[in-house]
């Protein structure tokens, strides 16, 4: 350790501080990011007595630098000498928690929360809690906002007098003059409620919750909805009706669509938190209203929750509730005027079939699936197709196949390439569910057509699709149905199509196995080495490199090697490069 | 006493909007968002209409102008009540008759307020405010385009504008009427009313915001008791915009109002106003949207003209929020700086010249020629040039090495020739200093390289040392564990390292 003692003198604090003050922001940032290195060089005592005071005094810098600093300080406990000295980190973090920039402040609060756990109960009361109080009564809204996130970490570990003070501070912030602070308090209400004793949840939190939920600003009210979930979980069932439900009912019918949206978005959580009885009596009608809301945003959020809501209904009355209350609304949503609503519904509606069982699915849901499969919006159709597996389990996909086919064909030929791309990705799944016969008959030609699409991303996806199909249906199927067609394209006048042949060989060789590769694919690839387009030639080199491991050493030496050697002397630079690369990778040099 | 001055000329009837760029004209092979949206438009609904369940059938009332004076107020009141009925404008054929009756009634009300003296009597105030509130206060519907970009996209226009416009027009006539009594109005136009009014500034419809701007300005001018409250709430909107949502459509309009308010501030500036400048107006420069910049620069210059002592905090603030990646914004910052320099006092200039010209030098070396060009244009401004000349001893050394280097390296010929002109100007200003700097340029470069090498050396050493320390720490803690295993020593690894380091 003598050596490291000597090092200290090499790095006087001034030099290090110069680095932290460098004119170039980027260099300053780099230095801050390596603050732990500097602290290590200084040792714990000088870090405490020299470095931290410097950092505390000079907190006026670019936000980016401050952000890095706030993050570093959260991991500094060991560098100042362990938990015993962790409170030394509070002054700089306190300043950082008051700066304007939200990202910096949030990071400072995160670090403060982290190091709060490293404080002993005594230190928490002597150092940490006073800091929270100072922040909570700061002049500018930023410090009060930051304070909101710190109450819950110190509350559980302080004495009851201090607890009372903390509760009072939190109450004050909930009725702060500035909406920013009220929003911060509202967003931490649930978290704070969780660490409070039940009697205070009932006496304090409920009144704060009610007040925030009827705030004049909708941005505050909607945060109260989030808190509602946590609060409802804490209360015994018998208190929910009187303490939480009036507010929740009011929120579900709020005049601002943002609040209603929030209720819809949190519906499953709310449902679990309030339990089956209240769900039956209150949430079912509320959910119906949200599904019929006048704003599409709200309807879409509610539609997204249809499956989860139904799943979580109490088992004894689930089917009745769905059939009499939910399904009629769902039927209307199928022909909603807004495409986002329809596509939200389409992404979950198939899940209802498992809940309702075979007969109900055939009678009530199937017509809806079919209607959505014919929807004018491709996203809706795609969402239905991507969830086919749910229905497959219940009624088998055959029921749908008649309508499925036109829908797939239409999507496969959609003018937007992203739509085509999306349907390609579902092909292997569809093929698996529809079976090889149906596939050969109806879908195979589509898959081949994509290989000559004018968009590269589609051709690429089509190639990958073929590989997955071969994995599913086997090498023999490949040899009979797709390999001949793929290899036929090697003579296409368009060089892009000729390259597609090579890409297909790359993708298929492994799945098809050595025999097919050697017998059918290799000769085609070798022949293409004479192509007049350089791009084709260097792709031959790449292909040979790729399929090399599948081939036996005999054909490698006798067939591949001479061709690669010839390509390595090509006039084109790229061809040479890739040929040489293949030679060295395959060990043919 | 503050006296708001007139707003910059832009009357509500001919809204000057920031949305004139015909987005479809930009041809880049991709359909523009606004075009993609066109199809969805019809599916849009309105939050406003939701709360009127039972539709009332309207019947036309007699005309105001045919009514004897004795019955005029009664009829006025009835018409106001009639105008409280809301109509569904998304269904454009629904209840056409009712819509027409309301439209005619609103027109008459506007006309009557504008032409007749003595119409506005006390009992009408609550009715008027009620009619206005019912019509204009509504939760704004969700934007049809979640990533609405005011520079790029067409705004969604308010469907009920045929009625809404007349209501706003009526509101404006009401406020501007010679019979308007602030002492009566303040009972109805209260804080809650103003707060709702301010929330409407988020409307995507520029026509609506234009009306709101004029109306709020009148309210601010006439209802003195609300001024502080209005300023505070505008601050809250801005702070939310800057630090939380980055979205509020009416920022530019609110800034315009503030600009004229600032003009009326009393001297010396109250700390509330300075706080607004430093903690709201300057941080507002971090906003993404560029459409608000003009209004910002306007406010900033208003502040400087009021009180020159705020100059330093303005310039340092701008430098702090200087854009790092968005060159378009950088050009606008430079524009704002030039506006500021146009009115700066020489004594203030001296206080900020150093950091300012370091930034200007950085802009000159920008590879984006528009940024470099905008910065070099400062030398074409006679007032700025005179400031530079007075402080040549300080400024030239700050920018010299950049000018010298960029003149040899920049890809754009215009920039190179602009730089030659600037260098020539400097040479004429102070040829001695210029020659000295030219002579020492190479030496300085060498020194810089040397410093850089030393830095790298320092960090290498530090990192090596860190490795060693970490190792010894680990060893120490291993020894500790062994010790603890044998005699359960209570010392922690951290403490042992403390002992070692001191």
Image (cartoon, coloured by chain):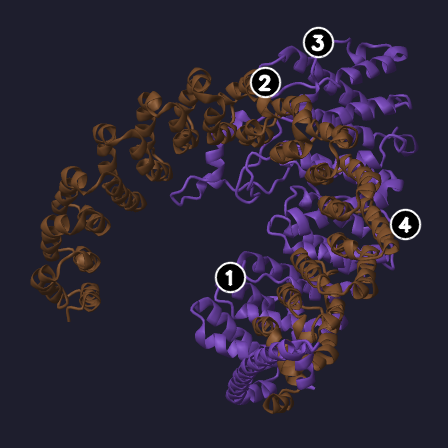
**How far apart are the alpha carbons under marks 4 and 2?**
63 Å
Mark identifier at residue B57: 3
Counting from the top left corner in percent of width and height, residue A47 is at: 69, 78
Q: Is residue A479 above or below residue A34?
A: above
**Residue A538 in view of the camera:** no
Residue that label 4 marks: B1
**How far apart are the alpha carbons under marks 4 and 3?**
50 Å
Residue at the image point whose x is 22% and y is 66% from the top: A585
**How far apart are the alpha carbons under marks 1 and 4?**
44 Å
Q: Which of A187 and A457 is in front in this view?
A: A187
Counting from the top left corner in percent of width and height, residue B500 is at: 66, 85
Residue A105 falls in image quadrant:
bottom right
Residue that label 2 marks: A325
Both labels 4 and 3 in a single chain: yes
Residue at the image point whose x is 19% and y is 59% from the top: A549
**How far apart are the alpha carbons under marks 2 and 3?**
33 Å
What is the drawing colour of chain B? purple
Between marks 4 and 2 in the image, the one whose residue lies nearer the viewer: 2
Mark 2 in CB contact with mark 1 (< 8 angstroms): no
Please state the chain letter of the residue tagged with numbered disc 1 in the rendered image. B
Q: Quadrant of the C terminus of chain B?
A: bottom right
- Looking at marks 3 and 1 on the same chain, the residue that comes earlier in the sequence is marked by 3
């Amino acid at each position: 350790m003598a050596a490291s003692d000597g090092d200290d003198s090499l790095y006087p604090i001034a030099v290090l501080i110069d680095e932290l003050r460098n004119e170039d922001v980027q260099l300053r940032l780099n230095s801050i990011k390596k603050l732990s290195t500097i602290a290590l060089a200084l040792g714990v005592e000088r870090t405490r007595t020299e470095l931290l005071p410097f950092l505390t005094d000079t907190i006026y810098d670019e936000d980016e630098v401050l952000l890095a600093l706030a993050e570093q300080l959260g991991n500094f406990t060991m560098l100042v000498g362990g938990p015993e000295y962790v409170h030394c980190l509070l002054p700089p973090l306190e300043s950082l928690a008051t700066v304007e920039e939200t990202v910096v402040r949030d990071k400072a609060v995160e670090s403060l929360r982290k190091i709060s756990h490293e404080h002993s109960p005594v230190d928490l009361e002597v150092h940490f809690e006073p800091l929270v109080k100072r922040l909570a009564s700061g002049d500018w809204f930023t410090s009060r906002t930051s304070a909101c996130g710190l109450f819950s970490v110190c509350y559980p570990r302080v004495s009851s007098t201090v607890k009372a003070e903390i509760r009072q501070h939190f109450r004050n912030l909930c009725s702060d003059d500035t909406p920013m602070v009220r929003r911060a308090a509202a967003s931490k209400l649930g978290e704070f409620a969780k660490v409070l004793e039940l009697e205070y949840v009932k006496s304090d939190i409920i009144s704060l919750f009610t007040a925030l939920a009827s705030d004049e600003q909708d941005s505050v009210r909607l945060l109260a909805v989030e808190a509602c979930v946590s609060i409802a979980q804490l209360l015994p069932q018998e208190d929910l009706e009187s303490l939480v439900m009036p507010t929740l009912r009011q929120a579900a019918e709020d005049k601002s669509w943002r609040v209603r949206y929030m209720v819809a978005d949190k519906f499953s959580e709310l449902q679990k938190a309030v339990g089956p009885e209240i769900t039956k009596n209150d949430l079912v009608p509320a959910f119906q209203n949200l599904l019929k809301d006048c704003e599409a945003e709200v309807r879409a959020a509610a539609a997204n929750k249809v499956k989860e809501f139904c799943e979580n209904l109490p088992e004894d009355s689930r089917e009745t509730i769905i059939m009499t209350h939910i399904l009629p609304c769902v039927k209307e949503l199928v022909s909603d005027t807004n495409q986002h609503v329809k596509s939200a519904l389409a992404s979950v509606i198939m899940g209802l079939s498992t809940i309702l069982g075979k007969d109900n699915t055939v009678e009530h849901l199937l017509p809806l699936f079919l209607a959505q499969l014919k929807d004018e919006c491709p996203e809706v159709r795609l969402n239905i197709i991507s969830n086919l597996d749910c229905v497959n389990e219940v009624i088998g996909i055959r029921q749908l196949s008649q309508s499925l086919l036109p829908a797939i064909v239409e999507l496969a030929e959609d003018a937007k390439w992203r739509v085509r791309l999306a349907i390609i990705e579902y092909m292997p799944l569809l093929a698996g569910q529809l079976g090889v016969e149906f596939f050969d008959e109806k879908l195979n030609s589509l898959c081949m057509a994509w290989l000559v699409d004018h968009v590269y991303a589609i051709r690429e996806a089509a190639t990958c699709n073929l590989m997955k199909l071969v994995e599913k249906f086997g090498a023999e199927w490949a040899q009979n149905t797709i390999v001949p067609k793929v290899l036929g394209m090697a003579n296409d006048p368009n060089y892009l199509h000729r390259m597609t042949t090579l890409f297909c060989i790359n993708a298929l060789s492994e799945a098809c196995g050595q025999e097919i590769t050697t017998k059918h694919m290799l000769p085609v690839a070798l022949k293409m080495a004479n192509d007049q387009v350089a791009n084709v030639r260097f792709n031959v080199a790449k292909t040979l490199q790729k399929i090399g491991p599948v081939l036996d050493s005999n054909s490698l030496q006798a067939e591949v090697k001479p061709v690669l050697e010839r390509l390595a002397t090509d006039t084109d630079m790229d061809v040479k490069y890739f040929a040489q690369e293949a030679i060295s990778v395959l060990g043919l040099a | 006493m503050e006296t708001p001055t007139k707003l910059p000329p832009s009357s509500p009837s001919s809204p000057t909007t920031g949305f004139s760029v015909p987005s479809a004209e930009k041809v880049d092979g991709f359909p523009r968002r606004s075009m993609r949206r066109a199809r969805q438009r019809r599916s849009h609904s309105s939050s406003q209409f939701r709360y009127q369940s039972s539709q009332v059938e309207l019947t036309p009332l007699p005309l105001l102008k045919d009514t004897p004076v004795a019955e005029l107020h009664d009829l006025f009141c009835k018409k106001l009540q009639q105008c409280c009925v809301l109509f569904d404008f998304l269904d454009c054929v629904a209840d056409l008759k009712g819509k027409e009756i309301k439209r005619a009634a609103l027109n008459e009300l506007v006309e009557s307020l504008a032409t007749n003296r003595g119409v506005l009597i006390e009992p009408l105030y609550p009715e008027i405010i009620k009619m206005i509130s019912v019509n204009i206060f509504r939760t704004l519907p969700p934007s049809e385009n979640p990533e609405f970009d005011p520079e790029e996209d067409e705004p969604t226009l308010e469907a009920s504008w045929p009625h809404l416009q007349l209501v706003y027009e009526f509101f404006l006539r009401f406020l501007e009427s010679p019979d308007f009594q602030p002492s009566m109005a303040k009972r109805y136009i209260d804080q809650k009313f103003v707060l709702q009014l301010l929330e409407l500034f988020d409307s995507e419809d520029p026509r609506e915001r234009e009306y709101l701007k004029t109306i709020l300005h009148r309210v601010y001018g006439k209802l003195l008791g609300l001024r502080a409250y209005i300023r505070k709430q505008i601050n809250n909107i801005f702070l939310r915009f800057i630090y939380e949502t980055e979205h509020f459509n009416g920022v530019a309009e609110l800034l315009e109002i503030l600009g004229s308010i600032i003009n009326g501030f009393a001297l010396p500036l109250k700390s509330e106003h300075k706080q607004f400048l430093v903690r709201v107006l300057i941080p507002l420069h971090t906003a993404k949207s560029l459409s608000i910049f003009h209004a910002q620069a306007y406010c900033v210059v208003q502040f400087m003209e009021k009180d020159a002592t705020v100059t330093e905090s303005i310039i340092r603030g701008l430098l702090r929020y200087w854009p790092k990646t968005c060159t378009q914004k950088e050009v606008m910052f430079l524009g704002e700086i030039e506006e500021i320099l146009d009115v700066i006092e020489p004594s203030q200039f001296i206080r900020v010249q150093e950091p300012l010209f370091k930034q200007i030098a950085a802009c000159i070396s920008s590879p984006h020629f528009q940024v470099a060009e905008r910065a070099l244009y400062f030398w074409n401004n006679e007032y700025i040039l005179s400031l530079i000349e007075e402080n040549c001893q300080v400024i030239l050394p700050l920018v010299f090495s950049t000018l010298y280097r960029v003149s040899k390296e920049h890809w754009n010929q215009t920039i190179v020739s602009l730089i030659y002109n600037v260098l020539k100007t400097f040479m004429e200003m102070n040829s001695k200093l210029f020659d000295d700097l030219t002579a020492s340029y190479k030496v300085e470069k060498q020194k810089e390289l040397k410093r850089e090498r030393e830095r790298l050396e320092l960090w290498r050493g530090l990192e090596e040392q860190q490795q060693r320390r970490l190792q010894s720490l680990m060893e120490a803690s291993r020894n500790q564990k062994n010790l603890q295993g044998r005699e359960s020593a209570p010392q922690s690894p951290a403490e042992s390292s403390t002992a070692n380091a001191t």
